[in-house]
């Protein structure tokens, strides 16, 4: 297998085990920084003393460090997977209902929805993810089963399941998501009942996975659409490229510019503290640290990705 980065960088030159150990040593000095996602009560008390990181090469080889096998709820990282299911089901018709522009606003913002007539800016802010969830519900039969099957086969972990306590907690405090869903529905851009869309959305956010699972789960985006974990072609190479482009421009909310600047890799974060990132054609990775910055991205996760891209030179720029 050709493991060369398109820029000509030969990944065999990198000692990934050593690089991950170095990053691990550095982040431990900063444990305690950031704040957990305290608007979800089940996440409010997570201690800020754990960090995990895993990367998966295209041939399936895994490098990992810290608490890389500790499960956490994947939250908005799931938006990558539901977007994949929705695009697989309805293709470019999705773009009639969701735009592809960065928002510059927070992940749960309502602001643009009114003057853009219920069309969310992108599939990765909560508003866009609710429309994507609606498309999956309408077009994927048993949507819950389909999503679980997708996650289990992409990650190679047959035990991936929903953390019911977190799902209940999200539903109990999800006033903004309820408002977003009703607002979008008022423009006719949700076809299923609001309650069904939110139930599915909270299921996807509350899936419990670890860094290795998650790095594997986006391996198809590093593999030109091919997932070596399951041996399947998940999407076309062109679609993988497009999803990576959306992750680069909108995957980390209103910090996407900073991510491009400091990390230079397509990435998707979740308020559970996880961030997945992709080095196209080379590898996928996941970091976890539950303390968030003011944009809702894992503070040390972002630092770790920054250090990784600097130490390896693996940036798309
Ligand atoms: N379940 C979270 C919410 O709806 C997801 C947000 C995120 O991970 O960014 O608020």
Image: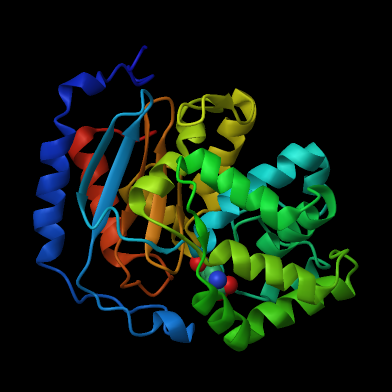
305 lies left or right of 37: left
Q: Quadrant of residue 124?
A: bottom right
> Percent from the top left, x then y, of residue 265?
40, 42
> Is residue 98 visible from the viewing direction of this image?
no
Depicted 222 relative to depicted 80: above or below: above
Residue drawn where x is 37% and y is 61% of the image = 71
Q: Quadrant of the N terminus?
A: top left
Say which residue appears at 9% left-offset and 56% top-offset.
Answer: 25
In terms of image quarters, where does ligand 1 lie? bottom right
Q: Position of residue 106 (x, y in %)?
A: 54, 71
Residue at left offset 46%, top offset 40%: 156
Quadrant of residue 289 in the image?
Answer: bottom left
**Is the residue 220 above or below the residue 164 in the image?**
above
Q: Quadrant of the C terminus?
A: top left
Q: Name the side, left or right, on which 111 lies relative to 191.
A: left
Q: Residue furthest top?
A: 1
Residue 54, given in percent of the width and then of the height, sits at 29, 45
């Amino acid at each position: 297998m050709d493991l060369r980065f398109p820029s000509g960088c030969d990944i065999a030159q990198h000692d990934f085990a050593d690089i991950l150990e170095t990053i691990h040593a550095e982040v431990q000095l900063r444990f305690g920084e950031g704040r957990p996602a305290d608007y979800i009560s089940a996440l409010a008390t997570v201690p800020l003393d754990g960090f995990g990181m895993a990367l998966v090469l295209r041939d399936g080889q895994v490098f990992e460090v810290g608490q890389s096998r500790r499960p956490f709820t994947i939250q908005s990282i799931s938006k990558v997977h539901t977007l994949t299911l929705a695009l697989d089901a309805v293709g470019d018709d999705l773009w009639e209902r969701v735009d592809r522009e960065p928002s510059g606003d927070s992940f749960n913002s309502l602001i643009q929805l009114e003057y853009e007539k219920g069309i969310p800016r992108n599939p990765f802010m909560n508003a866009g993810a609710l429309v994507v969830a609606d498309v999956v519900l309408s077009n994927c039969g048993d949507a819950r089963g389909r999503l679980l099957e997708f996650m289990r086969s992409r990650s190679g972990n047959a035990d991936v399941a929903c953390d019911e306590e977190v799902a209940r907690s999200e539903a109990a405090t999800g006033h903004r998501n309820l408002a977003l869903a009703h607002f979008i529905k008022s423009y006719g851009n949700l076809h299923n009942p609001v309650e069904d869309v939110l139930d599915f959305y909270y299921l996807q956010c509350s899936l419990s996975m670890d860094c290795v699972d998650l790095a594997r789960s986006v391996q198809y985006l590093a593999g030109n659409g091919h997932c070596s974990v399951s041996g399947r072609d998940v999407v076309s190479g062109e679609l993988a490229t497009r999803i990576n482009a959306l992750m680069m421009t909108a995957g980390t909310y209103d910090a996407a510019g900073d991510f491009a600047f400091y990390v230079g890799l397509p990435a998707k974060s979740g308020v559970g503290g996880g961030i997945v990132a992709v080095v196209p054609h080379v590898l996928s990775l996941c970091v976890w640290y539950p303390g968030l910055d003011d944009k809702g991205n894992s503070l040390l996760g972002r630092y770790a990705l920054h250090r990784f891209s600097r130490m390896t030179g693996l940036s798309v720029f």
